[in-house]
Image: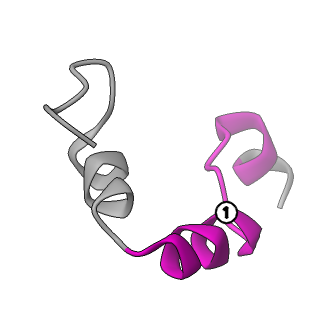
Amino acid sequence: MTGTPDHLTDDAVAVLAESIDERIYFIRSKRWIAYPKALEIL
């Protein structure tokens, strides 16, 4: 990969710098996206 994509967060750019295996692991891992209404319900 050349250059840093301007539309990505620093965390996303860091993931792109990892090996292919690490990127696949990241994509397949579960993540929690904080959604205010969901937090209110919980």
What scheme was used to colour the molecule? Answer: one colour
**6 over 38 or under it: above or below:** above
**3 over 1 or under it: above or below:** above
Q: Is residue 20 left or right of residue 15?
A: right
**7 over 18 or under it: above or below:** above
Please state the horizontal and vertical placement of residue 9, each as a whole percent of the image.
29, 37
Total marks shown come to: 1
User: Which residue is disc 1 drawn over?
Assistant: 27
The kind of residue tagged 1 is Ile
Q: Residue at the location (76% across, 70% down)?
A: 28
Which quadrant is home to the C terminus? bottom right
Whether 37 is among the magenta residues is yes
Please state the horizontal and vertical placement of residue 32, each as a whole percent of the image.
67, 62
What predominant SS class does the magenta segment belong to? helix
Spot the residue most to the left. 3
Spot the residue most to the top. 7
Specify few, some or many for label 1: CA neighbours under 10 Å numbering under 14, 14-19, or 20 or more.
Answer: few
Please state the horizontal and vertical placement of residue 3, each as a whole percent of the image.
13, 31
Classify mark 1: helix, strand or loop. Answer: helix
**21 over 13 or under it: above or below:** below
Give the magenta range.
19-39
Which picture quadrant has residue 4? top left
Which picture quadrant has residue 15? bottom left
Q: Is residue 16 left or right of residue 42?
A: left
Q: Residue at the location (28% across, 48% down)?
A: 13
Please state the horizontal and vertical placement of residue 16, each as a whole percent of the image.
36, 55
Q: Is residue 35 left or right of residue 20?
A: right
Which picture quadrant has residue 5? top left
